[in-house]
């Protein structure tokens, strides 16, 4: 009885799947899938490597400090970094005094109240504060940005596939759409005339749907003046800020990797000992 | 417990004797996983995975309890509380990454454990009850893992909850009220998050309870073995301790090396980037995909594309969506009937030439295809592949296996485990 019911159920499910298969194939032949503009013109991330890549990689403190400078002078005008506190910047190699100074000099102040009147007010940041957001709330952020919401950047490199390289590519990926060709030599506006970038958006083949609300943030060399004398090329700035935001998303990465090596070393010894005791105990038993 | 030659627990010293007369707990442990449990001497490394699954559960419970001390089940605070654990709690990043990847590794070892059972016929008499309890554990694990994935309240958490609870709304008449009952609202929200947290904390202990029954049921007939030939005498077995405790210790070392390598060096490899975006009910992700261990079942769900109805009348009896949901649950529930579908008296796949062909060239590839296609967007090539693979999956268990058991001529079995170990080698695989 079990086998008869099973046979019928199996016949039903498999049969419906094969019917569906026929349906899928017929539909595919009758109405072949139209290639989408994203499939044809979306670009893979640019090849870029960082000091922190790989199981032995460590953050480059100089790079992180330069990246912070790019963030604070360029990105922070629109993008918040809500999960990071000023005190965390000690990990970038700043002294306690420098962190205090950084917090105090931050362009946006921290919302507070006037201690005398209780009226809303702002005060300079202290190391214990999270990085203050450039906009008071989502409505204000959208109002200032053509109804687009600049995402918080605290986790941005973990929230995108291959995040650090994606960010680097996106920052450098603004192109003129007129006459833009992909590697196969296909011209976008000739193949997909209806895909012209709408007003208020910006063409960037590294963005998922090719049109991003953010205007190119890094527009010219020396947009930022680095304290360590590094020449601020566009590539350098994109790299540095990508490294900085990787740190912001994964501040404990160095602890993680060093703990990982210690754990692996311990386990290797443990496993060898366990293997030896296994062999010793089984020595007289054929199995 | 199982064999007359099992060593008996003899308490040494007055304290052990005193305890043994009042609460023979050490005796129970001795008989369960000590020298009092005789085990076939020919087990291969596939038999390590039961113990490893137990270890994985312990890792999940220990890390999970610590996480719950710092986690805050609120739609406004859950996401940030997870990041608080990652950034500010001492070694919180380790606890969280271990728990996150621990879930994946729990499924990896359980899938290998199930594979072992399927190939070596561990579900057959007299071990049906062990198998039934095992499938129950698997179902409980899936429920627990799903609810755990919702807790960080990222984009995939939210939309995963939306999609999975949406399955219930496919049920005619009672579907939508049932879904609202499960969620405590019209969409995943505070009520859903709270109850998922509560159940996510409860179910692992239910799993632990069913595992006790699973092991209890195992100790009645004793462990199976790669030849599938029953134990005939003392020479066929060795005491669990020290023989298999030593072998399991080695297996545990290898398992932990893999676990540690992923947890410390590629902790987000098995996750989805979208879950680092806070849940937003107004923005649907481009592709909603579940965790990798659900992908084969997700592929089965999506493979049903035509309604079942009376031809040329337009009357639909079972819509495609409902059929997908039924098939997805059915694909797991059919495992409950496996002991009665595969009627061959030969347990081990080694001695079943026809079974072995369907197993290696049919079932395993179709599961691999389903896992791969489950994570792909619904383009024609992936839909076609999953439809073929899913059709084979159902046919394998429900049609092919009962027929194979009937027509197959098994290879000659060794007379005993000892003979297999000392004399005739096992026939080569495949």
Image (cartoon, rainbow, N blue to C red):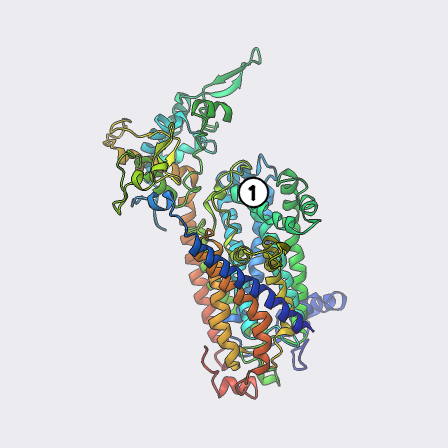
Above or below, A90 against A26 in this view is: above
> Left or right of A230: which side holds B285?
right
Q: Is any part of residue B331 visible from this angle?
A: yes
Above or below, A185 against A124 in this view is: below
| Residue closest to the eye, B127 or A39 | A39
Q: Is any part of residue B246 visible from this angle?
A: no
Q: Position of residue B312 (x, y in %)?
A: 60, 58
Name the element at disc 1. helix
| Residue closest to the eye, A8 or B183 | A8
Q: Position of residue B214 (x, y in %)?
A: 65, 66
Badge 1 is on which residue? Answer: B158
Circle 1 packing at 10 Å, graded few (<14), some (14-19), many (20+), is: many
Q: Position of residue A239 (x, y in %)?
A: 31, 37
Residue name at image x 53 percent, y 77 percent: B355
> Left or right of B340: which side holds A102?
left
Q: Position of residue A19 (x, y in %)?
A: 53, 62
């Amino acid at each position: 009885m079990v086998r008869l019911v099973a046979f019928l159920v199996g016949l039903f499910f498999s049969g419906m799947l094969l019917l569906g298969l026929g349906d899928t194939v017929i539909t595919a032949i009758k109405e072949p899938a139209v290639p989408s503009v994203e499939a044809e013109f979306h670009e893979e991330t640019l090849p870029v490597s960082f000091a922190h890549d790989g199981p032995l990689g460590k953050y480059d403190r100089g790079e992180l400090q330069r990246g912070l400078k790019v963030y604070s002078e360029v990105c922070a005008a629109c993008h918040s970094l809500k999960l990071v506190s000023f005190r965390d910047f000690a990990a970038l190699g700043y002294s306690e005094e420098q962190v205090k100074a950084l917090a105090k000099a931050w362009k946006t102040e921290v919302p507070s109240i006037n201690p005398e009147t209780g009226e809303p007010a702002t005060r300079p940041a202290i190391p214990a504060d999270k990085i203050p957001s450039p906009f008071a709330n989502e409505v204000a952020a959208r109002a200032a940005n053509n109804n687009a919401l600049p995402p918080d950047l605290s986790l941005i490199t973990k929230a995108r596939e291959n995040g650090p390289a994606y960010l680097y590519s996106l920052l450098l990926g603004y192109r003129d759409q007129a006459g833009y060709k992909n590697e196969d030599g296909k011209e976008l506006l000739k193949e997909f005339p209806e895909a012209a970038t709408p007003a208020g958006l910006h063409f960037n083949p590294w963005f998922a749907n090719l049109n991003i609300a953010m205007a190119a943030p890094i527009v010219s060399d020396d947009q930022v003046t680095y304290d360590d004398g590094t020449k601020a090329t566009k590539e350098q700035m994109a790299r540095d800020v990508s490294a900085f935001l990787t740190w912001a998303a994964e501040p404990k990465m160095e602890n993680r990797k060093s703990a990982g090596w210690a754990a692996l070393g311990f386990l290797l010894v443990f496993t060898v000992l366990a293997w030896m005791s296994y062999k010793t105990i089984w020595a007289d038993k054929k199995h | 417990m199982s064999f007359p030659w099992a060593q008996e627990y003899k308490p040494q010293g007055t304290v052990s004797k005193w305890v043994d007369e009042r609460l023979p707990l050490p005796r129970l442990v001795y008989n369960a996983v000590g020298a009092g449990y005789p085990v076939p001497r020919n087990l291969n490394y596939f038999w390590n995975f039961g113990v490893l699954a137990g270890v994985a559960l312990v890792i999940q419970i220990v890390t999970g309890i610590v996480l719950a001390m710092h986690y805050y089940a609120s739609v406004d605070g859950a996401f940030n509380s997870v990041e608080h654990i990652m950034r500010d709690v001492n070694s919180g990043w380790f606890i969280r990454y271990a728990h996150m990847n621990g879930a994946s590794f729990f499924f990896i070892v359980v899938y290998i454990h199930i594979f072992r059972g399927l190939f070596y016929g561990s579900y057959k008499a007299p071990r049906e009850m062990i198998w039934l309890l095992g499938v129950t554990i698997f179902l409980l694990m899936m429920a627990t893992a799903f609810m755990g994935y919702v807790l960080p309240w990222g984009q995939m958490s939210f939309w995963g909850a939306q999609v999975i609870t949406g399955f219930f709304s496919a049920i005619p008449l009672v579907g939508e009220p049932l879904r609202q009952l499960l969620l405590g609202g019209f969409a995943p929200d505070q009520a859903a998050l709270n109850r998922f947290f509560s159940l996510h904390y409860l179910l692992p202990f239910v799993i632990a309870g069913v595992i006790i029954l699973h092991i209890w049921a195992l100790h009645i007939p004793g462990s199976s073995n790669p030849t599938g030939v029953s134990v005939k005498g003392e020479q066929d077995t060795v005491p669990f301790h020290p023989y298999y405790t030593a072998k399991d210790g080695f297996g545990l070392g290898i398992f932990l090396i893999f676990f540690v390598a992923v947890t410390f060096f590629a902790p987000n490899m098995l996750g989805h980037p979208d879950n680092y975006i806070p849940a937003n009910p107004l923005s649907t992700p481009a592709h909603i995909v579940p965790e990798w261990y659900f992908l084969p079942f997700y592929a089965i769900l999506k493979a049903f594309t035509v309604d079942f109805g009376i031809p040329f009348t337009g009357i639909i009896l079972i819509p495609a969506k409902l059929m997908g949901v039924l098939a997805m649950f059915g694909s797991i529930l059919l495992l409950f009937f496996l002991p009665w579908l595969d009627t061959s008296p030969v347990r081990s796949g080694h001695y079943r030439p026809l079974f072995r062909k369907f197993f290696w060239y049919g079932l395993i590839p179709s599961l691999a295809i389903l896992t791969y296609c489950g994570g792909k967007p619904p383009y024609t090539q992936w839909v076609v592949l999953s439809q073929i693979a899913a059709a084979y999956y159902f046919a394998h268990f429900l049609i092919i296996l009962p027929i194979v058991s009937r027509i197959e001529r098994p290879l000659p079995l060794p007379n005993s485990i000892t003979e297999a170990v000392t004399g005739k080698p096992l026939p080569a695989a495949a």
